[in-house]
Image (cartoon, rainbow, N blue to C red):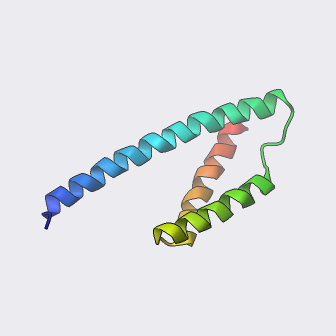
Amino acid sequence: MQDLSELREEINHIDEEIVKQIAQRFKITKKVGEYKKANNLPILNSGREEIIYKKLESLATEQGINAEMLKSIWQTMMLQSKKEQE
């Protein structure tokens, strides 16, 4: 059995990877915003958001985590993405 410090080190590594992936996601959403602006497209695409939330629900179920918690995290990220695209 691993000791507590090893488990925490694993968590720290995962947290670093999550932050890197979120940063990468925001780099891409910035490009999406630039594309939308250049092509006079609206920032909000509720159809796309609905697809994302359904996919997240499926992923949460597959991974055995709470879907509402995951949706809440994504809502926060998507809100920030929209703010940055404006």
- Residue 82 position, x and y percent, is 69, 45
From the viewer's perspective, is 17 left or right of 30? left
Location of residue 48 in the rendering, given as x and y in whole percent from the top left corner:
75, 53
Picture quadrant of residue 86? top right
Q: Position of residue 45 (x, y in %)?
A: 79, 50
Residue nearest the viewer, comparing 65 with 68 = 65
> What quarter of the picture does the N terminus occupy?
bottom left
- When the figure is inspected, residue 22 is found, relative to residue 66, above or below; the finding is above
Whether residue 69 is visible to the viewer of this picture, yes or no, is: no
User: As drawn, is 40 to the left or to the right of 8?
Assistant: right
- Quadrant of residue 42 within the rendered picture: top right
Q: Is residue 18 left or right of residue 43?
A: left
Q: Is residue 81 visible?
A: yes
Q: Residue at x 58, y 57 (%)?
A: 74
At 60% from the left and 67% from the top, the residue drawn is 58
Residue beneath the point at 51% across and 68% down:
62
